[in-house]
């Protein structure tokens, strides 16, 4: 074989190898792009989605100045990369006046408000506000939270349940921890014991994914604050929480349900999970967002940080420097009522009282009505049905039905289901789109 022929053969082999390498690199790049897309916050689609969520929260923050501001909305706005500093500063001012005064009134009357005080602290922390300057009745805000947590702890010791619930209890631990306040070993251990016993649930229902997520973030913060001494109990509790969150994932990617996935992803990221472990859940949240599932501001406020691969735990080292101020809100367009062609649907409302006796009511409601609107219509019909609601961060919730009150003091609430399935949304958010049976039953948790 001549040198020329040999050289040509070598060149052909080299060209073939280069071609195969280029194909491999191209395929690897495509696969990498596909696999990373659900978690990549830099894609145009992701940017447009999260910017849309940010604008929705900004709009909600401007609604009804007489309504108590929601600290969770401000928290999410401050954790997002896009900002409208003017609106956010105005909302912070409302938190420091309206919400502050309402909390002070509740505390003076001895009402348990652990979760709301904790969220208020996190919202202030997100704005890099000096929490040590905030006082209630000449006592520091953080001191009030510590007193609330001591009351919760004592109630657990006496009744095996917190004064409020383990979600608020976990939120209280997290707020203390990210503020640099040492969490009592006894307070921490009560949560660890509850995780070990599987007590993070409501009544006989399955364990709450939201509560597991908040507990995971709280204990992870405690762990990171005391890295030189991480005991086996604490580490086992974190392992248990992470395992249960991963096990809660549905075939569609959501963890628990559409409204608990945001907190679940936050917790997993906080506990050190790789972003790839959350990719299916992130894509599920995106799909739900595109389908208009997240319209309640509280739901958006919990999903938005997760979509940016952030968690409340990061507030511990949060800085408010060189922030964006690019978000401009267009004038709000007038709401146009869209009629469904006056389509009416028959709805059965069943009320089950504490003794187990039930009353049935039948009525026709316009398609697309909320459960709250259906109950209001039923009450207007004067068919011996009356109810009352109370405000919450998630919207209105049922407090009294036919004269029977659900009270936190006896750990009861009105459980609502549609055709036997518990509703995951508030009564003002859940829409009636087909004939169905709404069951309202007083339940203990």
Image: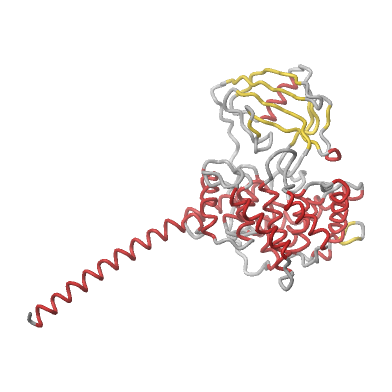
At 59% from the left edge and 49% from the top edge, which residue is drawn? 247
At 76% from the left edge and 25% from the top edge, which residue is drawn? 352
Color theme of the render: secondary structure
Count of picture labels: 0
Q: Is residue 197 above or below residue 30?
A: above
At 13% from the left edge and 76% from the top edge, which residue is drawn? 8
Which residue is more in the foreground, 104 or 272?
272
Q: For residue 216, what is the image quadrant?
A: bottom right
Q: For residue 435, what is the image quadrant?
A: top right
Which residue is more in the foreground, 366 or 201?
201
Tell which residue pokes out farthest to the left in this image.
2
Classify residue 413 as left or right of residue 318: right
x, y (%) of residue 167? 74, 49
For the N terminus, the quadrant is: bottom left
Classify residue 43 as left or right of residue 6: right
At 90% from the left edge and 60% from the top edge, which residue is drawn? 139
Which residue is more in the foreground, 336 or 348?
348
Tell which residue pokes out farthest to the bottom in this image.
3
């Amino acid at each position: 074989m001549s040198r020329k022929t040999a050289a040509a053969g070598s060149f052909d082999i080299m060209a073939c190898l280069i071609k195969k390498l280029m194909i491999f690199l191209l395929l690897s790049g495509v696969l990498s792009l596909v696999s990373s897309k659900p978690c990549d916050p830099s894609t145009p689609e992701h940017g447009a989605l999260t910017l849309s969520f940010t604008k929705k929260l900004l709009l909600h923050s401007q609604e009804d100045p007489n309504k108590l501001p929601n600290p969770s909305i401000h928290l999410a706005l401050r954790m997002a990369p896009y900002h409208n500093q003017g609106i956010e500063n105005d909302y912070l001012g409302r938190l420091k006046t309206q919400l502050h005064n309402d909390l002070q009134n509740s505390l003076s009357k001895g009402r348990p408000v652990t979760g709301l005080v904790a969220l208020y602290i996190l919202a202030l922390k997100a704005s890099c506000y000096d929490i040590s300057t905030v006082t209630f009745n000449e006592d520091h805000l953080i001191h009030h939270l510590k007193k609330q947590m001591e009351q919760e702890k004592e109630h657990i010791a006496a009744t095996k349940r917190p004064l409020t619930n383990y979600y608020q209890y976990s939120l209280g631990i997290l707020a203390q921890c990210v503020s640099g306040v040492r969490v009592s070993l006894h307070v921490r251990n009560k949560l660890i014991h509850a995780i070990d016993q599987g007590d993070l649930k409501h009544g006989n229902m399955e364990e709450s994914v939201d509560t597991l997520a908040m507990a995971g973030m709280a204990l992870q913060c405690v762990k990171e604050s005391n890295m030189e001494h991480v005991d086996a109990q604490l580490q086992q509790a974190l392992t248990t929480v992470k395992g249960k969150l991963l096990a809660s994932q549905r075939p569609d990617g959501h963890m628990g349900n559409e409204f608990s996935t945001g907190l679940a992803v936050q917790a997993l990221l906080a506990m050190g999970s790789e972003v790839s472990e959350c990719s299916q859940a992130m894509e599920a949240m995106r799909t739900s967002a595109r389908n208009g599932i997240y319209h309640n501001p509280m739901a958006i406020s919990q999903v938005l940080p997760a979509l940016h691969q952030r968690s409340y735990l990061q507030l511990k080292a949060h800085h408010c420097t060189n922030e964006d101020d690019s978000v401009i809100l267009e004038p709000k367009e007038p709401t146009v009522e869209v009629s469904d062609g006056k389509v009416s649907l028959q709805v059965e409302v069943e009320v089950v009282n504490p003794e187990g006796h039930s009353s049935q009511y039948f009525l026709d409601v316009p398609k697309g009505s909320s459960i709250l609107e259906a109950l209001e219509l039923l009450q207007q019909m004067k068919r011996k049905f009356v109810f009352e609601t109370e405000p919450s961060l998630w919207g209105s919730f049922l407090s009294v039905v036919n004269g029977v009150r659900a009270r936190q003091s006896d750990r009861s609430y009105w459980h609502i289901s549609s055709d036997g399935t518990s509703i995951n949304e508030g009564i003002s958010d859940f829409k009636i789109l087909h004939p169905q049976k709404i069951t309202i039953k007083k339940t203990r948790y």
